[in-house]
Image: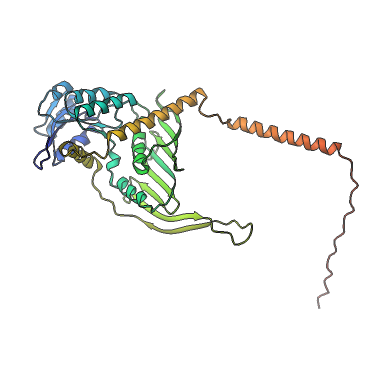
């Protein structure tokens, strides 16, 4: 397909549950796209879509939609467990594919989709929508400029009440957002991953997770993910050697930069140790209010019509799933008791007490075997005599 301002990408949306209607709306509103089809197993969802988008074909059969020779691309917004089969069918039918995150339910499946798309010369875009978020791209500019300095650590909270997914854990559901953001900001994968989870409501389906990451640069990151929180939080704190930054996705001021920190000045005297804390201005930079999903759809169309590499590339999709599977591996090692060779806190405490006991016994034995020494007479201190007050 050659580039032309008059050309549009005819797209079919599969899945009209939670996220699919948002994709359909942005496709319909895009000047470079046309909402040609919507596909869902729920007739009521199709009726509502047909009422809203006149001229858009509806079907409960993915095969019927893919058989349309005029259809250029498919956007898939279905449960994670169905991503691979639907995307594979669309690629094999010669359609470009946008798949809601994560790209597939395993790294093997995702790699197969990437390979199929490359062989067929088709665009495959994993739907990591936050990579198109204006605050996220603005923070990337700030970090790359060096304004924050060396990044010490990043703390992320992504919690809310629901929605529990029937086929994946909270790590697979919410984790891709922050894994893709971290990869985009830092430009690399972590070299160490550890995690803890708990299944509080549904057996064998973790709904809370705490994940720790360490990068080769020395930066560490902590992620808190949960479907069980009384409040909705989308907050990230970045602490650097020069400044600190808070990104709150649900705030009217999504980015705030703090000229704050702690410094260790050169000591003026021997043994002096005093930190200097700095609290300066707080700056909230202007951020574009464009809807990220609209930018994602535009990027998908540009990749098809103009041949540009999408911001959310297949490699990012693979890297995100690689991180998720590393988290799962860490959890498996924890369950098997092989997560770390370091002793447990109980074992470490026992070892320390044993060492203290051994030291005490040695000290007592030494004092008993030593020759008694005569006590030295105490020297009486002289107190200065004060003259009587007049």
Q: Position of residue 165 (x, y in %)?
A: 33, 28
Q: Is residue 374 visible?
A: yes
- Which residue sits at x=39%, y=28%? 325
Quadrant (top left, top right, bottom left, bottom right) of the N terminus: top left
Q: Nearer the viewer, residue 50 or 337?
A: 337
Q: Residue furthest bottom?
A: 390
Q: Residue 294: percent from the left, percent from the top?
A: 21, 41
Q: Quadrant of the C terminus?
A: bottom right
Measured as percent of width and height from the top left, residue 88 is found at: 23, 23
Numbered marks: total? 0
In the foreground, 122 or 136: 122
Tell me the residue at 63%/33% (across/down): 349
Q: Can residue 173 be seen by looking at this rendering?
A: no
At 86% from the left and 36% from the top, the residue drawn is 369
Is 14 placed left or right of 130 in the picture? left
| Image: 181 above or below 67 | below
The quarter of the picture where residue 107 lies is top left
Image spot of residue 80 (x, y percent) = 30, 27
Judge left or right: residue 2 versus residue 346: left
Asked if residue 378 lies left or right of residue 361, the reply is: right
Looking at the picture, tell me which residue is in the foreground, 151 or 217: 217
Q: Is residue 78 left or right of residue 65?
A: right
């Amino acid at each position: 397909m050659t580039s032309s301002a008059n050309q549009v990408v005819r797209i079919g949306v599969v899945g009209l549950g939670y996220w699919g209607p948002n994709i359909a709306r942005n496709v319909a509103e895009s000047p470079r796209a046309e909402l040609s089809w919507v596909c869902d197993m729920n007739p009521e969802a199709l009726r509502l879509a047909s009422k809203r988008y006149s001229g858009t074909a509806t079907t409960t059969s993915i095969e019927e939609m893919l058989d349309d020779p005029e259809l250029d691309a498919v956007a898939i917004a279905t449960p994670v467990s169905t991503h691979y089969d639907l995307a594979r069918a669309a690629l094999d039918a010669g359609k470009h594919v946008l798949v809601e995150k994560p790209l597939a339910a395993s790294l093997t499946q995702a790699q197969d989709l990437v390979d199929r798309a490359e062989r067929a010369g088709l665009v495959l875009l994993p739907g990591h929508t936050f990579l198109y978020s204006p605050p996220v791209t603005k923070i990337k500019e700030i970090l790359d400029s060096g304004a924050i300095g060396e990044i010490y650590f990043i703390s992320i909270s992504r919690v809310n009440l629901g929605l529990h997914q029937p086929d994946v854990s909270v790590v697979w559901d919410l984790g891709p957002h922050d894994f893709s953001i971290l990869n985009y900001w830092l430009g690399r994968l972590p070299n160490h991953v550890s995690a803890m989870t708990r299944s509080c409501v549904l057996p064998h389906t973790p709904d809370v997770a705490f994940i720790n990451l360490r990068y080769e640069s020395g930066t560490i990151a902590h992620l808190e993910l949960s479907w069980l929180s009384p409040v909705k939080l989308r907050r990230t704190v970045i602490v650097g050697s020069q400044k600190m930054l808070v990104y709150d996705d649900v705030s009217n001021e999504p980015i705030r930069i703090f000229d704050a920190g702690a410094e260790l000045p050169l000591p003026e005297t021997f043994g002096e140790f005093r930190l200097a804390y700095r609290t300066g201005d707080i700056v909230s930079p202007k951020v574009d209010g464009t809807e990220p999903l609209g930018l994602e759809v535009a990027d998908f169309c540009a990749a098809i019509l103009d041949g540009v590499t999408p911001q959310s590339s297949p490699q990012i999709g693979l890297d995100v799933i690689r991180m998720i599977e590393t988290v799962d591996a860490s959890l498996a090692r924890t369950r098997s008791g092989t997560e770390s060779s370091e002793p447990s806190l109980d074992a470490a405490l026992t070892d320390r007490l044993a060492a203290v006991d051994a030291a005490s016994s040695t000290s007592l034995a030494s004092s008993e075997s030593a020759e008694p020494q005569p006590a030295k007479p105490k020297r009486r201190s002289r107190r200065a005599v004060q003259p009587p007050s007049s």
